[in-house]
Image (tube, rainbow, N blue to C red):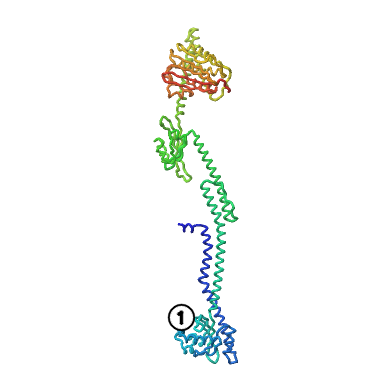
């Protein structure tokens, strides 16, 4: 693994490319250069000997002195080449002094030690065998085949080990055109050429090694210049992956790598901007989902929950995390059936069902991608329990108002028709009928007034007239006005004898009238009603308590609703439209106060409201 890692490392790859070529060049030089140089010098020497042989041949032909040996000796010195002339019998006819000395030394040395045959064999001479005096005389150079070729008129060039010199030599043989058949041989040792080739090779290797070292140094710095910015980019990419977009690449080179680094910095900035935008959008979406009054449920195509806002969890009483879990484990069968139907039909479907005393509407729609494939389902969940109850209350109110208006209108119509038809034949009866018409008309007028007042209160269109009010006196005046309805009922006032507050007297009086009237209405004729008044620092607390029939606990939260009436069956023949308590609540809250109720069915009710002593509108 370490080797693979090193191979895959960019620095090592680039450095390897710098090292590989010089090493290949060095290997080629080591393997091929010595032989090439030797061949080159040998070939050059051969061509030189050929030129010299032609010169020597021409000079021999032109010589008039008759002393060929002296001529050859002089030419040996001038040409630095051993010269020998051999006749057809293989005997040396003429030779230079240098060649003569070599021949004599060779014969004396080798004959004395018996080594001629072994040396000839070891040195690879073409014609070798036991060389005695006769062989040296008849074939002194061991060149029988070459001599025959030269005497036949051919030019011979070859190299091999010379038994006379004990070293490799180059030999060139050419025929000499005289009155006799003679052969001229020029002999030059190769040792000097090989030594020169070795020196040139060594010099070349030293230069190549120096070039390799320089290339390695240059390659190292160039490679580091390439890989260092890339390494910085790698570190920066890791930081970006970890969510750190603050740092930027610096000290970039002025080349393509630098341009890449600049592009990398730009990409990092844009990525940071996009991620921040996505984070803001996600936060905004989360806040929107959190603040929604409807539940939102997102289900993937594999029926896993991928989105659920707090309202949804509230509706279905979910406390645990449900994201990425099967939605069928947490939701009612009605919702599961709805999802299955949407998955099959791939169209929007709406359902309403009851679940744990709640009325729920679910509107599900398929979510498709750009390729038309179904990604999932989005469901909007609404708890419409209150809406349905309010709708029921509205319908009940319409029925009540219709009844309340129809009854007096029918009576008014009957009375007026009786008068117009002449059925009433006395003044007293006519006045009685007209008095009843007036009462019914006033009743209808009061109903319409209540509706209008409540609407204005809820719309904030009523201006309160603030003044100093004696609360005790106001309550007593209300009780006096209601004495005709009290019958045998007793009203007891408990609390301060005198309490002055700043509020709207007429609206406060309307509140007290409504509450005491309700207490009278739903308390038996021999029942008891208490009005408690408490001075509580900056506010007053007024309580109206009765021991009447009470209100069921389940209906306490609805009695303040517009048009709501507690079941008439518990106290039949009691007038009312369900607007009184709604008006009371709006007035108390409009005056900066608060009202609440505590009641038990069959035991009575206690209405308590609090008002500031000094109301500032």
Determine the image quadrant of residue 329.
Answer: top left
In the structure shown, which secondary structural element does the residue marked by tag 1 occupy? Answer: helix
Q: Nearer the viewer, residue 555 or 405?
A: 555
Q: Nearer the viewer, residue 385 or 104?
A: 104
Quadrant, the C terminus = top right
Tally of numbered discs: 1
Q: Position of residue 511 (x, y in %)?
A: 51, 18
Q: Position of residue 497 (x, y in %)?
A: 53, 14
Q: Is 389 placed above or below 18 here? A: above
Q: Nearer the viewer, residue 595 or 444?
A: 595
Q: Which residue position holds label 1?
A: 122
Work out whether residue 378 can be spotted: no
Q: Is 454 placed above or below 294 here? A: above
Q: Position of residue 8 (x, y in %)?
A: 49, 57
Residue, x 56% and y 45% (percent of image)? 273
Q: Residue furthest front?
A: 112
Q: Position of residue 496 (x, y in %)?
A: 52, 15
Work out whether residue 307 can be spotted: yes
Quadrant, the N terminus = bottom left
Q: Is 301 placed above or below 230 here? A: above
Dot 1 crowding, Cα within 10 Å, few <14, some 14–19, many 20+: few
Q: Is 35 placed above or below 365 here? A: below
């Amino acid at each position: 693994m370490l080797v693979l890692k090193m191979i895959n490392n960019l620095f090592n790859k680039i450095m390897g490319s710098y090292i590989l070529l010089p090493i290949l060049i060095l290997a080629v030089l080591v393997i091929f250069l010595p032989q090439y140089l030797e061949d080159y010098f040998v070939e050059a020497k051969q061509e030189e000997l050929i030129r010299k042989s032609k010169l020597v041949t021409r000079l021999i032909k032109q010589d008039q002195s008759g002393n060929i040996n002296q001529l050859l000796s002089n030419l040996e010195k001038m040409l630095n080449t051993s010269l020998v002339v051999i006749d057809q019998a293989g005997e040396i006819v003429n030779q230079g002094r240098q060649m003569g000395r070599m021949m004599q030394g060779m014969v004396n040395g080798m004959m004395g030690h018996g080594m001629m045959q072994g040396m000839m064999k070891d040195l690879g001479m073409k014609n070798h065998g036991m060389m005695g005096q006769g062989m040296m005389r008849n074939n002194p150079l061991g060149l029988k085949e070459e001599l025959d070729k030269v005497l036949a008129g051919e030019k011979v060039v070859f190299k091999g080990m010379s038994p006379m010199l004990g070293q490799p030599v180059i030999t060139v043989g050419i025929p000499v055109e005289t009155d006799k058949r003679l052969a001229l041989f020029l002999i030059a040792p190769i040792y000097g050429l090989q030594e020169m080739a070795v020196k040139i090779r060594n010099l070349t290797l030293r230069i190549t090694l120096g070039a390799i070292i320089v290339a390695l140094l240059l390659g190292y710095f160039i490679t580091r210049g390439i890989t260092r910015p890339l390494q910085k980019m790698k570190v920066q990419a890791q930081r970006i992956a970890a969510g750190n977009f603050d740092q930027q690449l610096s000290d970039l080179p002025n080349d393509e790598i630098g341009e890449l680094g600049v592009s990398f910095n730009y990409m990092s900035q844009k990525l940071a901007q996009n991620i921040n935008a996505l984070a803001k959008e996600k936060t905004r979406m989360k806040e929107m989902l959190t603040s929604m009054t409807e539940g939102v449920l997102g289900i993937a195509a594999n029926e896993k929950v991928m989105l659920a806002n707090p309202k949804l969890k509230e509706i279905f009483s979910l406390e645990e995390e449900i994201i990425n879990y099967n939605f069928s484990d947490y939701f009612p069968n009605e919702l599961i059936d709805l999802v299955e139907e949407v998955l099959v039909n791939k169209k929007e479907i709406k359902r309403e069902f009851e679940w744990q005393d709640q009325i729920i509407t679910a509107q599900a729609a398929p979510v498709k991608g750009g390729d038309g494939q179904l990604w999932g389902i989005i469901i909007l969940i609404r708890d419409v329990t209150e809406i349905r109850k309010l709708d029921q209350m509205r319908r009940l109110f319409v029925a009540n108002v219709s009844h309340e208006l129809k009854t007096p209108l029918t009576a008014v119509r009957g009375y007026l028709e009786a008068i117009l038809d002449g059925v009433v034949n006395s003044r007293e009866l006519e006045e009685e009928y007209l008095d009843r018409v007036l009462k019914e008309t006033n009743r209808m007028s009061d109903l319409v007034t209540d509706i209008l007042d409540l609407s204005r209160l809820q719309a904030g269109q009523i201006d309160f007239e603030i003044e100093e009010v004696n609360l005790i006196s106001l309550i007593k005046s209300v009780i006096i006005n209601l004495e005709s309805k009290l019958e045998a009922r007793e009203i007891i006032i408990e609390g301060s004898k005198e309490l002055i507050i700043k509020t709207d007297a007429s609206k406060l009086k309307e509140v007290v009238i409504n509450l005491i009237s309700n207490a009278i209405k739903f308390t038996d004729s021999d029942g008891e009603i208490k009005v408690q008044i408490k001075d509580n620092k900056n506010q007053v607390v007024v309580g109206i308590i009765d021991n009447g029939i009470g209100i069921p606990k389940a209906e306490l939260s609805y009695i303040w609703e517009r048009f709501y009436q507690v079941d008439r069956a518990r106290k039949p023949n009691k007038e009312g439209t369900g607007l009184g308590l709604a008006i009371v609540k709006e007035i108390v809250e409009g005056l900066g106060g608060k009202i609440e109720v505590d009641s038990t069915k069959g035991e009575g009710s206690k209405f308590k409201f609090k008002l500031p002593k000094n109301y500032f509108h």
